């Protein structure tokens, strides 16, 4: 029994590698940089579809940050102090890892489509400085998400048999629930509207003119008219006006 307990504990300890943890931190830093860039150029390019896609990338990274997978693993390891953790705790941790895997796969495909769209804009010679920065950030996001996808998929395949060895205690967390045997990304791949790289051209009807369109007018509150100020400005204009006096003819 003790050997089995130590074996399960060692598997969970090595579930998330140090490299994966470092890649997650780098991914969160890239998400923060993309968010700051979008805030700085939102007045210039507000309403543009390309920058709305960049904002959606930051939303995906924020959701991944909120899952906090390293903290989930630490909470599961703390349960070994009182013996074997329950199956409910294992299922809860497994759903968090599976959700992170879905988000990473979604982020990988989505960033690839955005990168292809940015390249089309660059080929038309528009917004070189902004597009170069955006392409560099999105490329790093794609590289990190690709490495994290492989790492998390390997971790999930190792973790699922461990959950089946745990025992229920008390009421079930989710009735008739079992973690899926393998990760299936067919739903994401079939979603052509957002996530398929082959359909990245359809994100915008005319990708070449994506940054040429005038920004949409923002809703603003009209300032109250000040008639007194207008009267004073007219009086000052009259003061500085040169008066021309016609000479009278002498009889």
Image (spheres, rainbow, N blue to C red):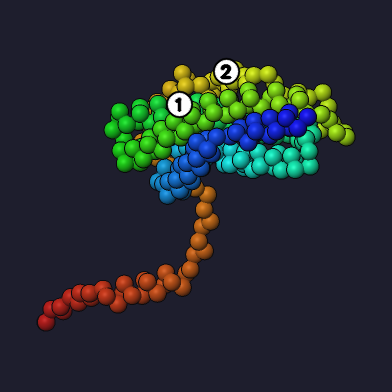
Residue 118 position within the rendered picture, expressed as x and y whole percent measured from the top left: 38, 31
Q: Is residue 43 above or below residue 238?
A: above
For label 2, the crowd category at 10 Å Cα-Cα, with few meaning under 14, some 14 to 19 and many 20 or more, is few
One can see residue 194 in this view: no
Instruction: Indicate which disc residue 190 carries.
Output: 2
One can see residue 250 in this view: yes
Residue 123 position within the rendered picture, expressed as x and y whole percent measured from the top left: 30, 28
The answer to which of 158 and 29 lies nearer the viewer is 158
Q: Is residue 36 above or below residue 198?
A: below
| Residue that badge 1 annotates | 113
Q: Earlier in the sequence, mark 1 or mark 2?
A: 1
Q: Name the residue furthest right.
A: 170
Say which residue appears at 59% left-offset and 20% top-offset.
Answer: 185
| Numbered disc 2: secondary structure | helix
Say which residue appears at 42% left-offset and 49% top-offset.
Answer: 40
The answer to which of 220 and 86 lies nearer the viewer is 86
Count of numbered labels shown in the rendering: 2
For label 1, the crowd category at 10 Å Cα-Cα, with few meaning under 14, some 14 to 19 and many 20 or more, is many
Quarter of the figure with residue 236? bottom left
Say which residue appears at 30% left-offset and 29% top-offset.
Answer: 124
Inter-mark Cα distance, 1 to 2:
14 Å
Tell me: 100 left or right of 217. Answer: right
Q: Name the residue furthest bottom.
A: 251
């Amino acid at each position: 029994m003790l050997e089995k307990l130590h074996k399960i504990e060692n598997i969970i300890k090595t579930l998330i590698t140090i490299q994966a943890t470092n890649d997650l931190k780098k991914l969160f830093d890239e998400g923060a940089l993309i968010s700051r860039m979008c805030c700085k150029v939102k007045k210039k390019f507000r309403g543009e579809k390309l920058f709305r896609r960049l904002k959606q990338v930051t939303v995906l990274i924020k959701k991944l940050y909120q899952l906090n997978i390293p903290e989930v693993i630490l909470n599961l390891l703390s349960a070994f102090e009182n013996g074997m953790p329950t199956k409910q705790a294992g299922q809860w941790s497994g759903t968090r890892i599976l959700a992170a895997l879905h988000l990473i796969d979604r982020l990988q495909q989505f960033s690839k489509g955005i990168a292809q769209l940015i390249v089309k804009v660059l080929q038309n010679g528009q917004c070189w400085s902004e597009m170069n920065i955006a392409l560099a950030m999105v490329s790093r996001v794609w590289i990190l998400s690709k490495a994290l996808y492989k790492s998390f998929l390997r971790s999930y395949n190792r973790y699922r048999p461990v959950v089946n060895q745990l025992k229920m205690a008390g009421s079930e967390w989710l009735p008739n629930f079992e973690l899926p045997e393998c990760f299936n990304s067919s739903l994401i791949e079939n979603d052509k509207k957002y996530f398929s790289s082959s359909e990245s051209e359809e994100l915008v009807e005319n990708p070449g003119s994506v940054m040429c369109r005038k920004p949409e007018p923002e809703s603003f509150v009209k300032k109250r008219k000040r008639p007194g100020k207008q009267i004073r400005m007219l009086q000052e204009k009259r003061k500085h006006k040169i008066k021309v006096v016609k000479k009278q003819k002498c009889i």
